[in-house]
Amino acid sequence: MGSGAAWFDYDRDGDLDIYFVNGTALPGTSTTGTNTLYHNNGDGTFTDITSKAYADDQGYGFSCAIGDYNNDGFLDLYVANYGPNVLYHNNGDGTFTDTTKVAGVGNSRWSVAAAFADYDNDGDIDLFVANYVEYRLENNPVCSRSGVQLYCNPEVFTGSPSTLYRNNGDGTFSDYTQKANLFNSNDKAMGICWGDYDNDGDSDLFVANDKVADRLYKNNGDGTFTDVAFQSGVALSEIGVAESSMAPVFGDINNDGWFDLVITNFHDEPNNVYQNDGNSFFSDITYQSGIGGQGLAYLSWGAEFADLDNDGYLDLFIVNGHIDDNIRLVRPSMTYEQPNQLFKNSKDQSFEDISGQSGPGLDLKMVSRGAALGDYDNDGDIDILVTNSYQSPNLLRNDTNSQNHWLVFEMVGTRSNLDGIGVRIKVVTSEHFQIREVKSGGSYPSHSDMRLHFGLGQSTVVDLVEIRWPSGLTEHFKGINADQFLRAVEGKGLSQIPN
């Protein structure tokens, strides 16, 4: 299906590095490759340091999650594979150690996505691993249409339960899936995202399933979850069918203080847009948003929100590409390689497809899978990394000619987890307010920059910054100048980070 990548500063030098997850050859077919770690040299170039870092997993990789699971100050790396997954502990000296067995997070199922979150707000991050279907290569079914062999529909396979690992605080994890009411053997999870959609102070979980009803797990605050997807209006499509859900992503598209939801889908299915009404219900605005109809001709995978022009509103980037390289034999109008899409927020709960006006990076037709967003050159705007199936990745530098202002926050927890995963920041200017939340994981099957970026439009000063930590602490800061990187240390204030 294709694999992803992650932006993360593994050596804490202030620049975003890249970890690429790669698939591998089938047994007996060719030489096995490895995942790859690139160090950001700080001058716009990267150096492959995989062999020096010892993070060269050779599994059949799909995605990765980033988080400091032992709160030692360095970001660790979890790789989701078809087969045993791998947890790499960051040693803080530029190398990693495989601690999978010690930590107890091997998970030998077909894992497609993973994300860290402190779901119980105890100060260390837990791990959710999304598993797809029960599949064995030796029993691979053969499917065809009109005499042409194609990949099988997911309905051919049996579902596989996903796993919640609770962090024990001593470098090990325990399987809490059933205790947390998250065990579902029929699920066929493709993507997940954590986010506090109901604004009650804890992390909720959305699971996107392939041809099975999606799940929205409300965090009950006592270590358990309740699936409220049906009563919230996000389990099925607007016509009541389970779609081929790929990548879910939370984001406040209309700056009303509530996380809305986008889910990418297969071709002939719209990419869904759900507006959070703030009353535990989501309204389906798929077609009104201008996004739904634009996705019908494409097979969409990774998606991510970011304010790409710094105007104060979240834009949306979606990557596309078919799974069948011979799709034209049965569908002449459909292509294997497809263009990716950039949607500009029109500030009225709708979006405009500006892909054709966004430079040569959006003119490419590839077989894309993952989208990871982050400011790799630290210039105040968000760049885009795209992974492609059987093709080289694309790094799209943001060269938007804009006079808009911005602000970026790096979080450091003291009572909360060290990386501040789950922290929510509200930024208030004379124009409006915005919210962002620190997250691990995200777009299928990739991981974006965990720093929180705010576009500020023409505002040069932020009137108010409100920071809500997972520990329950809320802090307020007034009169913050724009166009700077700030470090927020829980309970100790803000400081400027040189860039």
Image (cartoon, helix red, strand yellow):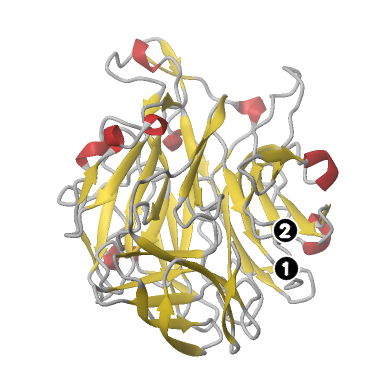
Residue under label 1, please give it: 173
Tell me the amino acid under the disc marked 1.
Phe
Q: Residue 287: horizontal and vertical position, in percent? A: 17, 47
Q: Is the residue under label 1 in contact with that under label 2 (CB below 8 Å)? A: yes
For the point 41% across and 70% down, which residue is it? 482
Q: Nearer the viewer, residue 431 or 180?
A: 431
Is residue 188 something one can see in this rendering?
Answer: no
Q: Residue 489: horizontal and vertical position, in percent? A: 60, 81
For the point 75% across and 36% down, which residue is it? 58
Which type of secondary structure does the marked residue at label 1 adopt? strand
Res. 317 image quadrant: top left
Q: Is residue 66 left or right of residue 332?
A: right
Is residue 333 something one can see in this rendering?
Answer: yes
In this rendering, the answer to whether 307 lies above or below 175 is: above
Which type of secondary structure does the marked residue at label 2 adopt? loop
Res. 450 image quadrant: bottom right
Q: Nearer the viewer, residue 333 or 499?
A: 499
In this rendering, the answer to whether 365 lies above or below 405 is: above
* Label placed on residue 486: none
Q: Nearer the viewer, residue 97 or 376?
A: 376
Residue under label 2, please give it: 105
Tell me the amino acid under the disc marked 2.
Val
For the point 55% across and 79% down, which residue is it? 223
